[in-house]
Amino acid sequence: VDLPLFFERMKLTLGFSVLVIGCVLEISVGRRISSLDYFNAILNLSLENPRFDRMLEMKELYMDQFLVRADPMERTMEDLPYFKLFPKYLGTVAPGTTLEFHNVTCYHTIKLSSVLTESNEVELTVEHSEADNLLCHRSFVVTTGSFVQVKEVFGNGKNTWTFSSDGSPEQDWDIFERGPRVFVHMTTPEELLYNIGATFALFEAEFTTGVSEIVSNMNREFLKHYVGIDMTVRENAPDILDIPEELIKDGDTFNIIRLNGLAPMIGWAMGAATGHTVVALWREERLYLCESTTVSECWPTNGIQCNPYSTWVKWAKEADMHAVWAPLDRREGARTLDANKAWSLVDQLVGNDYGYEVVLMGWLDTIKDNLPCVKDRVNPDFCLEAETFELLFSFVQRVSFDAARVFVPAVQQRAGVPFNSTLLQAYHAAALKGIMPTEIFSIPEKDGWLYETTRDGKPVVSTSMVCNVFVCNVWKAGGLFNGTDVNCGDTSVNDNYKLKMYQDPELRPDICKEIGPENPNCQIIGKYSLRLDSQPGVPPRYNYVPLETLGDEEMFGHCPSMAPDYLAPMDC
């Protein structure tokens, strides 16, 4: 065992326990959104008797095992536990229907049936038979828009649930027309708990100022085997590459990844090398980096903000971020940004909260071709499915208004219902227009849509922007698109750096070539290599989508992002 690393691990364990308690208290008064909300929801939708302390024990067990593993970084997706937690959607069982499934799990036959009783209730029966061994046991999840239950079953048998409506139009539609939905978990509850804990370990740096070597390595392993990105150690790299500020121009971007679970997960979902982006703007002979971000243990201020370049780099270094500078095209005749026009927009937006309401929308362009699957050595694939979003956020909305912000308002917006509506009410309203629950999130986000959010902590109705949407809007306001009405709202984090408007990498400054001769981008901070051209998929991947294509309003709204190949049209 590496003793220094071992003792670091012990300190982190004690510190993390304190931080978890602090974060839980902070969540309870609604001041921030944390991955704890979602892992708690996943736990409750996975186990009949969920215990958060047991999940934390599995997290610690996995990290201890990772520490002493003889093959760090070399296990493939099939042998790793990360994100092997998605249940399989079996079906929606309308009254009077029967569905039958074969060889889905260790039960060779699963039969779902639903009937309308004389008392005007819907009775659902789930029958599981032909178990392939005496120890066969799995968890079923039964749900409607107002009910969810996890049932762990052993051996052959059947279980029955009865559902009634409260008389509201949305519940009548949900129960009597649609019928209850049934999911089954693909592995045992014991293994599922371990997988949840191991996946949560990737996110430990969300609760610390820096990122420990163990957490960095786990996230690098995840990126290597799930996304195809190998972030190797940078030899002899300075802590901060001191780029002369005068070389940085208005509209240049800095593209970032932090090995904190969240950013690598974004990279996996979108096929991106990064999870965050900021834009450079000069004002009164001072260089600022402007962004939409969130306050956290590693970042002191919230929302849309501009910080002096030197301050930003210092904070980013302390947070163990990895960042590359991507300068815009400097050639004569190339498009340039009007900083005054850009600042006019930024000044209107500074103080707005981060765009939680739209955080998933730039990614979810299609009904199924953006949703990842995880291969396993023993079990069937663990796949995120369109139906999983309703399962997850119907539950989340009932336990945490803040956590529901990342999905529910976007559905309400598309359904045309008030923001105080329930998710079920929004789905019902959309269904009346012919839009099914599994389709609604694929409707492209539109610039100009307004959401209930905050500015400087006070409630307002305003636009909602994540990092890349904010940068894209700054470019648009500054004239970089030559007046083309680009729909920035539906962009994903790597859509920005795909645009063919960056400087030829061969023209990057000598200081960048000296420190990273093989990197076409100029990395300013980070222990491990970050390359925008290393995102997965078919080359060229960076600086290639012609700006002339931006006139297509659906340009960013139809892009698949299926790992591991991330095949997509050239205008995506």
Image (cartoon, grey):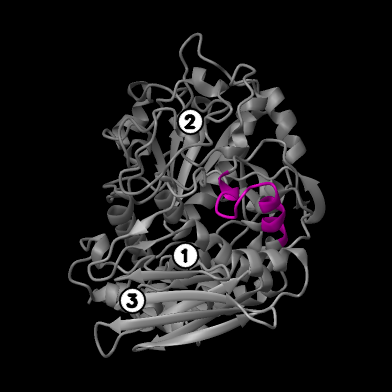
Query: Disc 1 on helix, strand or loop?
Result: helix
Q: CA distance from mark 2 to mark 3?
A: 67 Å
Residue 491 shown left or right of residue 560 in the figure: right
- In the displayed orientation, state which residue is furthest to the top: 333
Residue 532 lies, with reference to residue 221, above or below; the image says above
| Residue 430 painted magenta | yes
Residue identifier under label 3: 109
Task: In the rendered structure, find residue 140 and report the number of the disc placed on it.
Answer: none
Residue identifier under label 1: 205
Residue identifier under label 2: 244
Q: Residue at x 42, y 54 (%)?
A: 264
Q: Which of the two discs, 3 and 1, labels the residue nearer the N terminus?
A: 3
CB atoms of marks 3 and 1 within 8 Å: no
- Which one is closest to the eye, mark 3 or mark 1? 3
- Which one is closest to the eye, mark 2 or mark 3? 3
Name which residue type carries label 2. Answer: Pro
Residue 344 lies in quadrant: top right
CB atoms of marks 1 and 2 within 8 Å: no
Residue 468 shown left or right of residue 572 in the figure: right
Q: Viewer-proximal residue, 333 or 405?
A: 405
Query: Disc 3 on helix, strand or loop?
Result: strand
Q: Which residues are magenta?
A: 425-442
Q: Which of the two discs, 1 and 2, labels the residue nearer the N terminus?
A: 1
